[in-house]
Amino acid sequence: MNDKTPEGTITLVGAGLVGSLLAIFLARRGFDVELFERRPDMRTQVMSAGRSINLAISTRGINALKKLSLADEVLAHAVPMKGRMIHPQSGDLAFQPYGKDDSEYINSISRATLNKLLMTAAEQTGRVKIFFNQRVSGYRVETNTLELHDECANRSYQLQANVVIGTDGSASAIRHAMEKLPGYNVLQSELDYGYKELVIPPLSSGAFQLEKNALHIWPRTTYMLIALPNFEGSFTCTLFLPFHGTPSFDSLQTKENAHGFFMEQFPDAVPLIDNLEETFFQNPTGHMVTVKSEQWHIDGKVLLMGDAAHGIVPFFGQGMNCGFEDCTIFDELLENFRQGTSVDWKGLFHAMTQERVPNTNAIADMAVENFAEMRDKVGDKKFLIQKGVEKILQTRFPGRYVSRYSLVTFSNVPYTVAMEAGVVQERLLSELCSGLEKPEDVDLVKAEKLIDEMLINVRQKCSTVNVR
Ligand SMILES: Cc1cc2nc3c(=O)[nH]c(=O)nc-3n(C[C@H](O)[C@H](O)[C@H](O)COP(=O)(O)OP(=O)(O)OC[C@H]3O[C@@H](n4cnc5c(N)ncnc54)[C@H](O)[C@@H]3O)c2cc1C
């Protein structure tokens, strides 16, 4: 069988978070969309545990949803997380706010709730058809043909597309096909850490067992446990641990080992976690990979977006946010490359690649760096003084000093600008904090002078960047 996509219809592969959102953007611009998804429809079937139960949505993701008037509906299902709650091995909990004040926070949302909501919103446009249980097994660029397998009917077929956009995640079948072409460059590096999800259920009253409006972290230098709240009162805990060495997923082979390790390292979490030892061995161990593709498209035929183009480790909470920002920027660029019903797809895909690759590479690198901050530095005295000084600077010099974390999480400035600012801020903070015993003693006159120099420096370095 050889099918052909109707004239003018766009073919998307992967109805995850980014594919479903992109379908809505395209439909609102008047395009018909066919979306092929390998899994069953999660709105009608119970799905096995995915790769993360919940995730944090922040400004870039919310900005995309606002453009589609979906932000309020989505955020109604989210739990605000106003800061990190640090759980030391012994001693008191410590709360570190994320933003400059209460208006800045991140939001924990269930991946499934968000995905279902986006799929439904896509279908409600009347222009998007989602075909479930349809796995793309190959793609031929010469003819723009997808090879598909219908998982229910156990039947393979081909589909000739007009334009293909691969939103099929970090192990993208579309990218794998593109990688085989001469001159196509993809950098992939797998982290030598895995992750395991566990659950802290709500109390029988439905109440949360930990502070609800926080992302909880148990930092232990080379590994960590975190917990994000779920809307119905539970927390999803994630243990990030090396695959090999001691301790590691390799070294925790028995229920006794696992129990002993948790009792020693996370004693306050143990009584709260549901069925710890069983779940630890039942739940899969996830892998994390950074994917950097230098080229996101081939002519005007095929484009990659979301994790398919840029796999990011989860430590800045930005993978989905960045993928949603891809959609916002695609939508803005689309208008520049469209005349009536005709679109210069090649020009658009090229512009998209030029605009996004430096930025997605920047967030990929910052996400790897942030792992060290979360698992190690958040409990460190020097780091806490720097964070305290940073908070004072943000309040005393509003708009002139904005921390790298805030630029990434609470703004839409390009990630490259946030990264550049972070490098200069690191130097500035280390100069201001040298010998400092408490943040309040910071020399504000010196700070203002250094901030002015920093702004000139960052502006010069970023003068070619289009700051939105
Ligand atoms: C542990 C963890 C925590 C995270 N936390 C956060 C966070 O807090 N904040 C944040 O912003 N991001 C977070 N992320 C990253 C986020 O999950 C991803 O960036 C996001 O899911 C990317 O969306 P996507 O649509 O590009 O890919 P995916 O969500 O992977 O969706 C891809 C879709 O394509 C389908 N598909 C795959 N292959 C095929 C095929 N061959 N044929 C047809 N369909 C196919 C899949 O079934 C899936 O539906 C986290 C990731 C992990 C692993």
Image (spheres, rainbow, N blue to C red):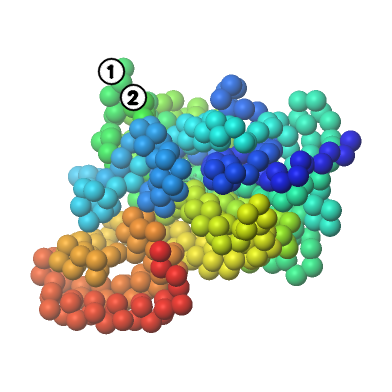
Residue 165 lies, in percent from the top left, at 67, 50
At label 2, the amino acid type is: Pro
Kindly give the residue lying farthest to the left in the view shown. Answer: 441
From what the image shows, is residue 168 above or below residue 392? above
Mark-to-mark CA distance, 2 and 1 = 8 Å
From what the image shows, is residue 6 above or below residue 281? below
Q: Nearer the viewer, residue 183 or 142?
A: 142
In the image: residue 460, left or right of residue 31: left
Which residue position holds label 2? 202
In the image: residue 298, left or right of residue 18: right
Quarter in which the N terminus is drawn: top right
Q: Nearer the viewer, residue 467 or 439?
A: 467
Which residue position holds label 1? 205
- The residue drawn where x is 31% and y is 17% is 204
Quarter in which the C terminus is drawn: bottom left
At label 1, the amino acid type is: Ser
Residue 235 appears anywhere in the view: no
Residue 322 lies, in percent from the top left, at 48, 54
- The residue drawn where x is 65% and y is 65% is 347
Classed neighbour count for the residue bearing mark 2: other residues with Cα under 10 Å, few (<14), some (14–19), many (≥20): some
From what the image shows, is residue 456 above or below residue 173? below
Residue 296 lies in quadrant: bottom right
Q: Are marks 2 and 1 in contact (CB under 8 Å)?
A: yes
Residue 248 lies, in percent from the top left, at 51, 48
- The residue drawn where x is 49% and y is 50% is 324
Q: Quadrant of ligand 1?
A: top right
